Image: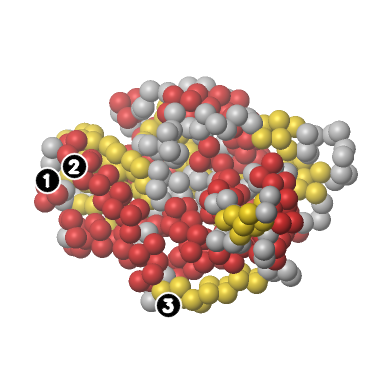
Amino acid sequence: MSSALPAASIGIDFGTSNTVVAIATEDGRVETLRFDHAGSSHSVYASALCFTQERPGSSLPPSVEGGPWAIERLIEGLTALRYIQSFKTFAASRSFQKTTIFRQNFQFEDLLATFLRTLVRHAGSQLDLSTARVTIGRPVTFAGVTPDEALAMQRYCDAFGRLGANSARYVYEPVGAAFSFARNLDRDATVLVADFGGGTSDFSLLRFSRIDGVLKAEPLGHAGIGIAGDTFDARIVDHVVAPRLGKGGRYRSFGKVLPLPVHYFTTLARWNELAFMKGSADLRELKELARFALEPGPLEDFIALVENDLGFPLYRAVSAAKMALSSQEIVDFRFADAVIDIQSTITREAFEGWIGSDLARIAATVDQVLANANLPAHAVEKVFLTGGTSFVPAVKRLFADRFGDERLTSADQFESIAQGLALIGMAENPDQWAVAA
């Protein structure tokens, strides 16, 4: 890690795909912590865990790595392993009680605390959560069909508390982004912040003003929805990958020919669930179905994808195609392994059709935050877009149509939330921005 700033305030943006940490000093400077790995310096720490067991069947606890070190272990694949990604999506899920990894049970808070320990270890002495003021980001709306916010916050407090952050405040993630953006405002303004993460899209409306040279902010409204980058990835998986791995196929049962159950392919399209499929009852059932499938080959490829821990390379291939569609009208998709080879051509027009209903729900959520504040769209003077999904042309059009292209602005897609959270910790009254845990 390259930073040498003494931390007076720490901001932590624990994201579905990536986690970012920023520190602010007493003199108002703010800097993102960087992690040196394999000759490169990273400002993001992948929200991933890799558990490895040197000797199969050993009673010893597995060793664990996080961030880019977890990805490195997965790619090396030298020992028995379990790779976990996008587990933030389970934070508010009552149905997720535990997962067993090499005979050891992990609840959500255990996974999060384990992940945080790897992050603190690689960050070094500057990241002491027990001494500095700590501000932690949280979604406006947690991911899931029926998210339990109280449960999610209980789990967050438990996990961060194990690292010494018992007095941490929790702030909506788009509010953190707003504070980062507001540093450069040269006049009073009403600002809508749209934060597109991996699991959720969150929106905050704030009024910023300077009184006697001091930046003041008034919250006007918040709204969020569990649709974001991972949802868009899922549409690509559903239309391009899943049919190649058996979706739409049939199997024989008691003399009848039946369609293959679709819930396995729903799991395939959700990175958080796919990461837990190895060793699960679903995988055992899938193997049984393959025995009776009219075309077993695709299902056997699906099984190989899970057993050989190919979820992460698949995720990278799908995400790369999505990103490429932001600048190209047509993209050649390719995911290849020793056993599996999936090729397809994806057009931007087709992709936008696949995500059409998702865009409509995002638009409705934007309208909701305006309605909550009793403000018309023309009263919003600046719209700050952050997060990788904000670069999707259809998403940008959604905001340009409502607010005008000239009002849209964006900044670093990864660092703005964490830096804003660290700045909130240095504010005159930081607790006014805290959400009850």
Q: In this view, does 185 lie to the left or right of 166?
A: left
Q: Which of marks 1 and 3 precedes in the sequence? A: 3
Which residue is the site of mark 3? 330
Q: What element carries label 3?
A: strand
Q: Nearer the viewer, mark 3 or mark 2?
A: 3
Depth check: give the residue in front, 42 or 302.
302
The structure residue drawn at horizontal position 33% and vertical position 41%, both measured from the top left corner, is 224
Q: Which of marks 1 and 2 precedes in the sequence? A: 2
Q: Nearer the viewer, mark 3 or mark 1?
A: 3
Three-letter amino acid code at disc 1?
Pro
Q: Do the residues labelled 3 and 2 touch (CB within 8 Å)?
A: no
Q: What element carries label 2?
A: helix
Which residue is the site of mark 1? 376
Query: What is the C-alpha distance between the residues marked 2 and 1?
Result: 7 Å
Q: Do the residues labelled 2 and 1 touch (CB within 8 Å)?
A: yes
Res 371 visible:
yes
The structure residue drawn at horizontal position 37% and vertical position 59%, both measured from the top left corner, is 355
**Percent x, y for residue 333?**
53, 73
How packed is label 3: few (under 14 Cα within 10 Å), some, or many (20 or more)? some
Examine the rendered structure and indicate whether residue 336 appears above or below residue 54.
Answer: below
Q: Which of marks 2 and 3 precedes in the sequence? A: 3
Which residue is the site of mark 2? 370
- The circle on residue 321 is none
Q: What element carries label 1?
A: loop
How packed is label 2: few (under 14 Cα within 10 Å), some, or many (20 or more)? many
The structure residue drawn at horizontal position 70% and vertical position 63%, both measured from the top left corner, is 296
Three-letter amino acid code at disc 2?
Leu
**The C terminus appears in which quarter of the rendering?**
top left
The structure residue drawn at horizontal position 73% and vertical position 68%, both measured from the top left corner, is 339
Query: What is the C-alpha distance between the residues marked 3 and 2?
Result: 35 Å
Query: What is the C-alpha distance between the residues marked 3 and 1?
Result: 37 Å
Three-letter amino acid code at disc 3?
Ile
